Amino acid sequence: LDLAKRTIVVVLSDHGEELGSHAGAPYHKFFQRPWYLGHEFSLYNDVLRVPLIIHHPRRAPQRFSARVRLMDLAPTLLDVLGIEPARPFDGASLIPVIMGVDRRDRDIVSVMRSEPERGLSAFALMAGRFKYIYNGPPGEAQHQEFLYDLSRDPHEQTDLAGQARSRAASMRAELFRRLEANQRKARALRSRPRPTPAPEPTDGQLGELQETLKGLGYVE
């Protein structure tokens, strides 16, 4: 079938892992230790930055340093295949990056709501060389914020929020402007007529799904 000559292969990960490299971060008080191992309670780049490898059988290997987003993947694949999307994507095709037309870092908004009832909510914005993190429910007086210059501090060890207050404030405002825009979009989508629901899975399908999740380590 010569599948290797006509198949696009994508390798990626949904998240990384924090391995105790941010001692003193605010969520550590919930774990009774000064460090954290895992990915549920963190918006540091240890967790957010993941591999993205796209193999196209008719393109020579290249490596790009521009910051992109996983939500850019679906519009990229449709763009390569010449398929018009059924509705607009939040992401954007990476073809301009791959063709060398646009190598700019893309802005990234990240949200973590693992346990909002315990105050474990966090929001982050990466724009240009800076990254801003807001820990805590929006509008809470007890929130914490962090600012990092990723060009000089890629491992996010030196918090600049206390020194660069105006930049932190402007990035906070931009972050919450984008979050509000996303909420408006979500409300509009929820107001649309819902499609016909899929049939309920059979016991056999549920058992197969349970075994698959167990094999991936998500359930015991």
Image (tube, rainbow, N blue to C red):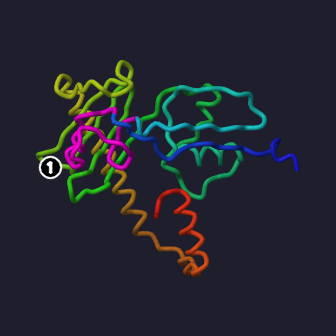
Q: Residues within 10 Å of mark 1 (few under 14, many from 20)?
A: few
Residue drawn at the location 58% of the way across and 26% of the way down: 64
Q: Residue furthest top?
A: 152
Q: Main secondary structure of the magenta part?
A: loop
Residue drawn at the location 53% of the way across and 77% of the way down: 197
Q: Position of residue 157 (x, y in %)?
A: 30, 26
Vertical arrangement, residue 60 with respect to residue 12, above or below: above
Q: Position of residue 171 (x, y in %)?
A: 27, 34
Identify the image quadrant of residue 215: bottom right
Vertical arrangement, residue 58 with respect to residue 207, above or below: above
Identify the image quadrant of residue 109: top left
Is 176 placed left or right of 46 in the picture? Answer: left
Kindly identify which residue carries mark 1: 140
Vertical arrangement, residue 90 with respect to residue 173, above or below: below
Q: Which residues are magenta?
A: 21-45
Residue drawn at the location 66% of the way across and 26% of the way down: 62
Is 119 placed left or right of 131 in the picture? Answer: left
Front position in the image: 2 or 22: 22
Q: Position of residue 75 (x, y in %)?
A: 59, 47
Residue drawn at the location 37% of the way across and 27% of the way down: 155
Q: Amino acid at mark 1?
A: Glu
Front position in the image: 26 or 215: 215
